[in-house]
Image: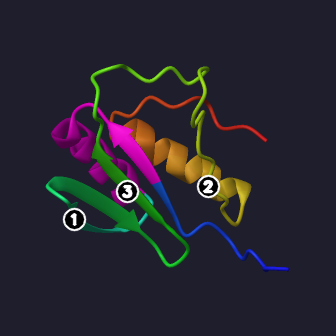
Amino acid sequence: MTDITGIDHIYITVNDLAKSEQFYDTVFGILGFNKNSFESGTEKHIQYFCRHFGYIIRPARSDTVHNPYSAGLHHLCLRVESIDDVFSVSKNFWKAGIAVTEPQL
């Protein structure tokens, strides 16, 4: 049996790559991720990564807005070392103008 050790990468499609890049630059900058970009075919992809996994955004092929309650990705949760990390990141998101729910256990 194969031993799965974690997530390698996640691809997310976005309607506005430039706007999404600005948003994720802030989010993943706060989280300390690295960034690069590459092309797959003729489409630009932007990758944010740390030593554990990569998060890649790419252009959507339709302009339909994602509904988190339809089939597909609902949300992504990242594991951190302590509850203090959760509160710290939440505070930094608020400072950056990113509305997040209040942190809780």
What is the quadrant of the N terminus in the image?
bottom right
Amino acid found under the numbered disc labelled 2: Leu
N-terminal of the pair, mark 2 or mark 3, is: 3
Q: Which mark is residue 37?
A: 1
Q: CA distance from mark 2 to mark 3?
A: 15 Å
Q: Secondary structure at mark 3?
A: strand
N-terminal of the pair, mark 2 or mark 1, is: 1
N-terminal of the pair, mark 3 or mark 1, is: 1
- Residue sitting at 62 percent across and 31 percent down? 102
> In this figure, which residue is indicated by the disc labeled 2?
78
Q: Are marks 2 and 1 in contact (CB under 8 Å)?
A: no
Density class for disc 1 (Cα within 10 Å; few <14, some 14-19, many ≥20) is few
- Residue sitting at 55 percent across and 70 percent down? 8
- Residue sitting at 52 percent across and 69 percent down? 53
Would residue 76 appear left or right of 21 to someone viewing this image?
A: right
Q: Nearer the viewer, mark 2 or mark 1?
A: 1
Residues 52 and 98: in front is 52
User: Magenta residues, as a range?
Assistant: 11-30
Residue 80 screen position, x and y as percent: 66, 62
> In this figure, which residue is indicated by the disc labeled 3?
56
